[in-house]
Image (tube, grey):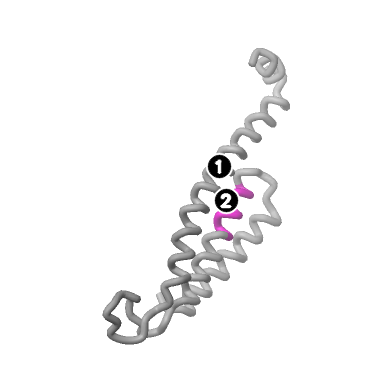
Amino acid sequence: MSGQASQLTALVLLLVASLGLSCCRSPMKLVMAVATMEWGVLLLAVSLGHVEGGVAPILPLSGRAANPLPQAFALTAVVIGASTVALALALAARAQRAEEDRESPEGEDRGRRR
């Protein structure tokens, strides 16, 4: 994928995530919108390090190399982001379950037994 196509895709992801953040009130959907925004930012960061006709930044260099720093940052952010999204989804599921228990009449009895 060329640099411009990657940047355009990243901007579309950011716009879709912004729409999701502004329209959705479900905790699960909000977490997924934030994750989509993260993917858009990472794609944008990696595409900014793209060099047209560049080679992989491995020695010995046989031409103009791509910038490896955005790739390293993106790899670190993917690992951190995956664990953060997993934790946020678990908390959102727990909050949604607690909300459903509060709203249902038999949830009140079940809540007292815990």
Magenta-drawn stretch contains 67: no
Compare residues 69 and 90 and report the one nearer the observer: 69
* Residue 28 percent location from the top left of the image: 60, 44
Q: Which residues are magenta?
A: 29-37
Compare residues 103 and 75 and report the one nearer the observer: 75
Identity of the residue furthest to the front in this view:
59
Residue at 52% across, 61% down: 39
Left or right of 109, for residue 79: left
- In the picture, the quarter occupied by the N terminus is bottom left
**Picture mark count:** 2
* Residue 14 percent location from the top left of the image: 59, 65
Vertical arrangement, residue 21 with respect to residue 73, above or below: above
* Residue 48 percent location from the top left of the image: 50, 76
Disc with the residue nearer the chain's start (2 vs 1): 2
- Using a 10 Å C-alpha cutoff, classify the residue at mark 2 as few (fewer than 14 neighbours), some (14 to 19) or many (20 or more): some
Please state which amino acid type lies under the numbered disc 2: Met
The residue pinned by badge 1 equals 87
Residue at 71% across, 18% down: 108
The residue pinned by badge 2 equals 32
What is the CA distance from the residue labelled 2 to the residue labelled 1? 12 Å
Secondary structure mostly seen in the magenta stretch: helix
